[in-house]
Image: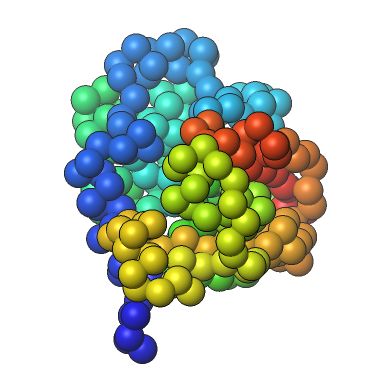
Amino acid sequence: MGADFDPVVHNRIAWDRLVDNDIEWSQPVDADVIERAGEGDWSVVLIGHEPTPRNWFPAKLSGVRTLCLASGGGQQGPILAAAGATVTVFDNSPKQLARDDQVASREGLELRTVLGDMRDLSAFSDEVFDLIINPVSTVFCPDLAPVWTEAFRVLRPGGLLLTGFMNPDVYLFDEASLDQQTLVVRHRLPFSSLDLSENDRMCTYGDGPIEYSHSLTEQIGGQLKAGFMLTDLVEAPHHADITAEYFPAYIATRAIKT
């Protein structure tokens, strides 16, 4: 990659392409899911296919000002909106956001979409949200400190940050071998797919998004450094590869702005 390479622009284009390919995380929820959410029967995921614990959320969602951070795709945002939250979906991919707009239009939901880089929430004033939900997406972000600082700024005191992320140990292993259900240690941490040779990157990642492993210091310690207090943590296996037999590939945290 050249000196003028911008990973945010690259990942925006790459994610738009993934939406065109209708990947799992870009498939809008159906009308039945929205109907049940309106009746109080709802769940959303932060990691893999695991429902986020309901006690991580406010007891009542009605009127809860919610930011779905890097959470486009027509899934979490529309569900929470149907459950009564006042929802803004913020994402780097226009086509991911279009999926949220699609569900909102189809189901008559009030929902706002905003395009941008998750490190820069300057589109929002201080202390305007009660809840931030951030499914696994920091893996596509070059540096996390600004994400946590901005999340802290836009939350009101007592506001909640629910975030899911990758266990960095996943990136120790050769991706092609994982596809063959074999664990082969290949990489040092921290890892970025930018560190691969162009040939290896194209063989493994193709024209997909750039990924970053991010240490637990960055992912959990960064939240604490920004001022959050961690109140809970859960782990889950990867839903699609052999690492699930050996260790949890996903981590989710619940933190509060004190």
Pinpoint residue 42: horizontal percent, then vertical percent: 51, 18
Q: Residue at x 34, y 12 (%)?
A: 32
Looking at the rendered structure, the number of numbered marks drawn on it comes to 0
Quadrant of the image containing the N terminus: bottom left
Pinpoint residue 109: horizontal percent, then vertical percent: 31, 28
Residue 90 shows in this picture: yes
Q: Nearer the viewer, residue 164 or 131?
A: 164
Would residue 140 be found to the left or right of residue 57 on screen? left
Pinpoint residue 136: horizontal percent, then vertical percent: 52, 46
- Tell me: residue 182, above or below residue 92: above
Q: Residue at x 66, y 32 (%)?
A: 245
Quadrant of the rendered image containing residue 218: bottom right
Check the image and tell me how it is coloured.
rainbow
Quadrant of the rendered image containing residue 82: top left
Q: Residue at x 62, y 34 (%)?
A: 244
Q: Nearer the viewer, residue 185 or 118?
A: 185
Quadrant of the rendered image containing residue 207: bottom left
Q: Residue at x 52, y 14 (%)?
A: 40
Would residue 193 be found to the left or right of residue 249 on screen? left
Q: Nearer the viewer, residue 224 or 17?
A: 17
- Tell me: residue 169, above or below residue 32: below
Q: Nearer the viewer, residue 1 or 139?
A: 1
- Tell me: residue 250, above or below residue 128: above
Residue 151 shows in this picture: no
Would residue 21 be found to the left or right of residue 222 on screen? left
Pinpoint residue 123: horizontal percent, then vertical percent: 41, 64
Q: Residue furthest bottom?
A: 3
- Tell me: residue 216, above or below residue 19: below
